[in-house]
Image: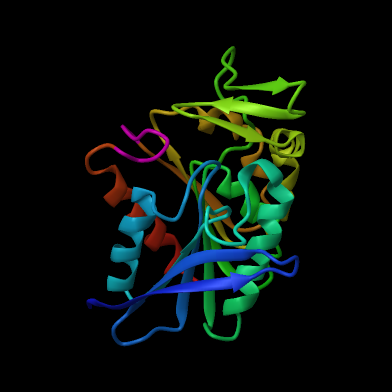
Amino acid sequence: MAIATEEPINIETSDGHIIYGTLNRPDKGTDRLIVFVHGITGSRKEHQFYGAARFFPQRGYATYRFNLYSRDNKGRVLSDIDVRTQSGDLDTVIAHFKGKYEKIFAIGHSLGGPTIMGADLDPVKAIVLWDPSLTPDTTPGKKFYRYDECLKKYIIRWQFEYNITAEMIEQWKNAESLVNNLTKPTRIIFAGNYSIKATWKNKLAEIPALHDDITIEGASHSFDEEGTQEKLYEATIGWIERF
């Protein structure tokens, strides 16, 4: 089954912003949609989402990947928002597609996990979280963020520096409180070569819905290593096809 269409779908928010996204659909149509949610500083163009937009339509699923912030007109700005804002925009996306698809699935990477956990999951059939981040303090003794008194914002530093709100950091630190919101069947896929799995050790049993977790050995946080992305997709579809 080949991909027949890739089209931009931009959705207006209730507070005057625009969510920029891309819909991919299989050639024969489908009643199943996967909504992808990226992590902090990420975008719909990251390799794991771009590859997913090719893999899943070949298996009979439409995919929608969108930017939580964008340089485009009326797009949100990362330095102005927090996790709750992101969850609200995910609600807007799901509401847009509700009624157009019989089954909607949510997949989130990294901070996309708490974004999903804070959203209205009633229309969602099942969830897959890709190495979901419960806290910014993933690696003991190593902090990638600091508070700037002049800016009144946190600065996170990876290969670039980004300004983010204090609310974003505080809500991220408290993301484990959202685990009880996972009321739909949930699979968590951990990266074997990253430290996030340890932060979930005492939280997995608190997930109220049917759930499991697996680890892809040899994978780092973004599943960049040879063959790990394919394993990620297979483990994902193996879960959602049950529902």
Magenta segment includes 123: no
Name the residue: 61% across, 77% down: 96
Is residue 44 or residue 18 the one in the foreground? Answer: 18
Name the residue: 58% across, 54% down: 68
139 relative to 241 in the view: left or right = right
Residue 25 can be seen in this image: yes
1 relative to 117 in the view: left or right = left
Which quadrant does the N terminus fall into? bottom left
Is residue 232 or residue 88 the one in the foreground? Answer: 88
Q: How far across and down, in percent of the image, does residue 161 sit?
A: 53, 28
**Does the magenta stretch mainly form a helix, a strand or a loop?**
loop
Task: Name above or below for residue 137 compared with residue 69.
Answer: above
225 relative to 158 in the view: left or right = left
Name the residue: 63% across, 62% down: 90
Task: Name above or below for residue 192 compared with residue 31.
Answer: above
Q: How is the image coloured?
A: rainbow
Q: Outermost residue, top direction?
A: 141
Is residue 206 or residue 87 the one in the foreground? Answer: 87
Q: Which residues are magenta?
A: 217-224
Q: How far across and down, in percent of the image, does residue 111 sit?
A: 58, 43
Residue 82 can be seen in this image: no
114 relative to 20 in the view: left or right = right
Give the total number of marks visible in the rendering: 0
Q: Outermost residue, front direction?
A: 73
Q: How far across and down, in percent of the image, does residue 239 sit?
A: 44, 61
Q: How far across and down, in percent of the image, does residue 126 sit?
A: 55, 65
